[in-house]
Structure formats: C-alpha cells, structure tokens
Amino acid sequence: MPAPQSRDERWFEDLFDRYHPHVLAYARRRLPSDAEDVAVDVFAAAWTERDRMPDAPLPWLYRCARNRVLTRQRSRNRHLRLTLKLTRLSPSAVSPQAAESGDADEWTRRLFDVLPDAEIEILKLAIWEELPLTEIAYVLGCSPGAARTRLYRARNHARETLAALGHPATGHSATTYPATP
Amino acid sequence: MTVDQLLRDANPVPAVQPLSTRERNLMLHTIHERINADTLTSRKPLRGGRRFFLVPATWLAGVAVAGVVGMAVLAPADTPMAPAANAAELLNQAATNVPISTSQSALSSSPYIKVHKVGQVLASTGPTGWMVSTDRTEYVPLADTERTWIVEATANQVTQVYGSGTANKPRPETYVWATRPAGANEPGWARPNQAFLATLPLDPQLLRDRLYEHVAGHGFSDDAAAFTAISDLLKSGYAGDDLRACLYRVLALIPGVRIVAVDDPSLKGATVFTLDTGQDQRELVIAPASGELLAVRTKLIANMELVPAGTVIEQIRVTSAAVTGVPAELRAAVVGPCKPGPRPNGCYEQ
C-alpha cells in the first residue's frame, strides 16, 4: 500500500480492482438483495477516508461493510424478519430428505437460526472470509485474544447446537489459526 | 464432518467473478455519484462542498463513458461523430489568439507557480443548497520536496440555490495551509507537475497522440476521457500559455466536442465547449477572440438528490504566473502540523 499522500485516483482504482470482489462477496453472503449498494457505500467511504485507511485495507473494508450491512438490516421491517425467523424455526423448515442427506445449506440455516448474531458473524469471518484472527479482531473491534476466545466459543456452540438439532456427525474443527501476536 | 466443513459447503458465495470492463466502469461511476451525493447531503456546511474539487479525473472519465454508452443507444444513426465545424474553428481561433506571455518552459523552470482560482461551488447544508464563492491562491513548487502553500477565502458571497431558511447559511471563512510535498509520486496526466508538462509536445497531433495513448482503454470512449483530462489540466492552472493553446487545438481534434448556449450573462462573448457525458457535464468557457479561458464548469444534466438538473455545481476561473517564492506572511501563517480530521486553519500536512 502506498503512503496516504500518494492515494490518488490510480491508487483507488487499484484498490477497487483488487478488493471489490471480496467486499461484494462479503455483502452477498449477508445481505444479497443490497449487496451491490453496500459495496458502493464501502468504496465511497474508502475514498472519503483514504487518509485514515491502514496499509492493509481489507479488514478496514470488511469492517466498513459490516457496519453498512448492520445498518441496513436494522432498518428493515422487524415484523417481516420475525415472521421469517419463526417460519425457519418450525420443524417443517428442514425437509426430512435434506436432514438425512446432510444438506449443508439446510443445516446451516437451522444453525444460524439458533446461534446469536455475534457468533454467526465470527464464524463467517473465519470460514467464509478466511480471515486470520488479527484481522477478525480488527473487523469486530476487539482484541485478538478476545477474538480467539469468541471464535472458540462459537465453534463449540455451533457443534453442540448441531448435535441437539440431530445433525448426523459434526466433530471438532480441523482449522487451526495463528497464535495471537 | 466439522463445523468448518459444514459452513464451507454452505457458503452461498464461494467466489465472485471479476467485473467486465463495462461493469467496472459503471460501478466506479456509481461510486463517484455516491460520493457527490454524500457531499451534497452532508451537514458539514462548507468543507463538504470543497470536495467537488477532489473528484478524480479518471472517475469523471468513467462518467463520460457511461454517458457515451447511453448516447450510442439513443442517438440516431446519422448523429455526426466529427466535431461541429464551428466548434473546431472557434477552438483553433482561440488557440491562435492566445497571447504567449508565460510559456510552458518559463513555468517549468520557475521555483513556484502562483495559481489563482476564483469562482463558485455548490455547498449543501441538508435541505438547503448554496452557491458559495471561493477565492483560492496556490503556490505550487517546482521541486517535489517542497510544499504547496494555499490560502482560500470562502463564502464571501452566498446565493441560495434551493430550499428555504438561512439557519445553516455558510459563513465567510479563510483557511491557510500547506500540503505535503509531492515526494516521489510518479507524475502524469492524472498528477501533472512541471517536469511532466515540460515533456509534452507542443504539436497538436503529437500531443493528441500522447493523450490518447494515456486514456486508451479507460472506459468505452477515449474521446470523453481525453476531453476530461484536458479540462482537468486546464483547471489545474499548471499549463503555460503555449501548452494551453495547443490543448485548444487538441480539443478541436476530438470528435463530439460541441458548443452549448451561454446561460450566464457574465460570460457574454464567450463560447462554451462540451462533450456529452450523460452526467456532470464538464464545460470549458473560452473567449475565441482573446484565447482566454474564462471558466471551467460542471453542470448537472439530471436531478441529483435535491439539486435540479441544469444547476452549475462548480464554476472556476483559473489564472497562473511564474513567481520566485512564497509570500513571507503566508509562510508565517502556517504555524504547526495538521491533526487528523478536518483540516484546521494555519497548519501543514504531515
């Protein structure tokens, strides 16, 4: 990353070309209907705040995207969300065929209906965005040590929840993460 | 199966395909619009308005690109693609009549260039919009290790453009500050300095070729990007008289450059040249009889938030001269380093 004083339009276009797919994927995984708008918001903020952006921009971009997603989610119709959640929580929301076959989408939906939002987000950051702990900590605004603890608890809670839901086999995580610096 | 494996299998977006060139430019255009919209709806009274000065050239090229695409779809088949004869003739006439009092070689060997920018810029305070005067003087160094020194007086004249009420009417303010040295940044069309400008040919065809080599592939229309790059360079005030005259002749070679009606009584006798871009129309106001660049303007051709189409959101007149140094009183007014956040008065950027 160049120094802030050389962050001109060429720097911005390079930033956009390199990281837009990541930001768009992040947004689509959380808010598919508004993903493009979220990405536009994030890069508009990146230009406005370019002097304050750290040398490694991706965690900053994810953090910005997370805030935008949360804002949009909060503004949505609460009643509609409750209705959808209740529908998903009903026993018929997962078809027997899907449950028996271990359909990952269906089980993940059921898991996310039970887990707290904070645990869902840290699991997504670790597994979908494949961020190391230090970057997860930056996105969430906590220390790397706290991020490690939260991720450990989220994995355990997810495993216990899947077992309680009747998932056929979910063992310990095979993923390892670098030690906290 | 681990939790990680389960979630990895359920990832709804395993990867995102790279954007096509067209999608990329449209997305950059949308981001540019969002930045402008944020500026216009910002409650920061004037500092937000200043951001109009900061819209990068290549994004404007992206805007131009989007407009040209629209034109390609909407324009009738017999739309002339060469510049209207009178536009090219008047641009060449203006080039001939430019008095060469400060050549590019003189500017490029001077320790500093004094650039004076006077005009109006749109500032918004929520539901009300104002045209705010700006009077800005820059002392731009030849050496890239030196700072640019700036004094800017704003809002000495304020005219309401839309909305009602005067609660947030911008107040007159004067700022003095010094930028970071340009340092080792590679100069070019997007970041011109005197060393770069001194390398440009003063033959219109050669200069046109150099410019088009730079803008090639930036979007769908090299012509729109070239027009924007020239207007940015003219607006910077860095071009000497002979280079400015040559740039007029290059404009005469760009297909699609046309004349629009003068809608400002204060610009009587001038000719307004533009190139259709679909959004944020850039206009060069030139007096053919004297070759003088009277203003560089940006006009909305579509509504943006509360700002109606047709609004001139920026109009700047630029003059420049070679000088030997920065006035002592300006240096004395800059007393310490700037802190993060909005730029305070009287500081130098670190």
Image: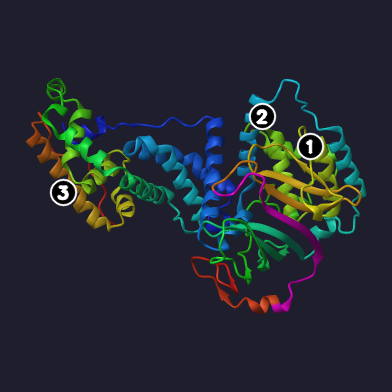
CA distance separating discs 2 and 1: 14 Å
The residue carrying mark 2 is B71
Q: Residue at x 84, y 49 (%)?
A: B270
Taking the magenta stretch, the answer to whether it contains residue B325 is: yes
Q: Amino acid at mark 2?
A: Met
Helix, strand or loop status at disc 3: helix
Helix, strand or loop status at disc 1: strand
Q: Amino acid at mark 3?
A: Arg
Q: Amino acid at mark 1?
A: Arg
Q: Which residues are magenta?
A: B306-329
Coordinates of residue B321 in the picture (x, y in percent): 81, 63
**CA neighbours of label 3 inside 10 A, class few (<14), some (14 to 19), many (20+):** few
Out of B110 and B239, give the one closest to the viewer.
B239
Out of A26 and B30, give the one closest to the viewer.
B30
When asked about the image quadrant of residue A142, the answer is: bottom left
Looking at the rendered image, the quarter that the C terminus of chain A falls into is: bottom left
Q: Chain of mark 2?
A: B
In the rendered structure, the answer to whether residue A107 lies left or right of residue A36 reads left
- Residue B258: numbered disc: 1
Residue A25 appears in the picture as rendered: no
Position of residue B332 relative to residue A153, above or below, is below
Q: Residue at x 58, y 46 (%)?
A: A10
Coordinates of residue A2 in the picture (x, y in percent): 53, 53
Question: CB under 8 Å between callouts 1 and 3?
Answer: no
- Looking at marks 2 and 1 on the same chain, the residue that comes earlier in the sequence is marked by 2
Coordinates of residue B319 in the picture (x, y in percent): 79, 60
CA distance separating discs 2 and 3: 57 Å
Q: Residue at x 55, y 49 (%)?
A: B306
The residue carrying mark 3 is A153
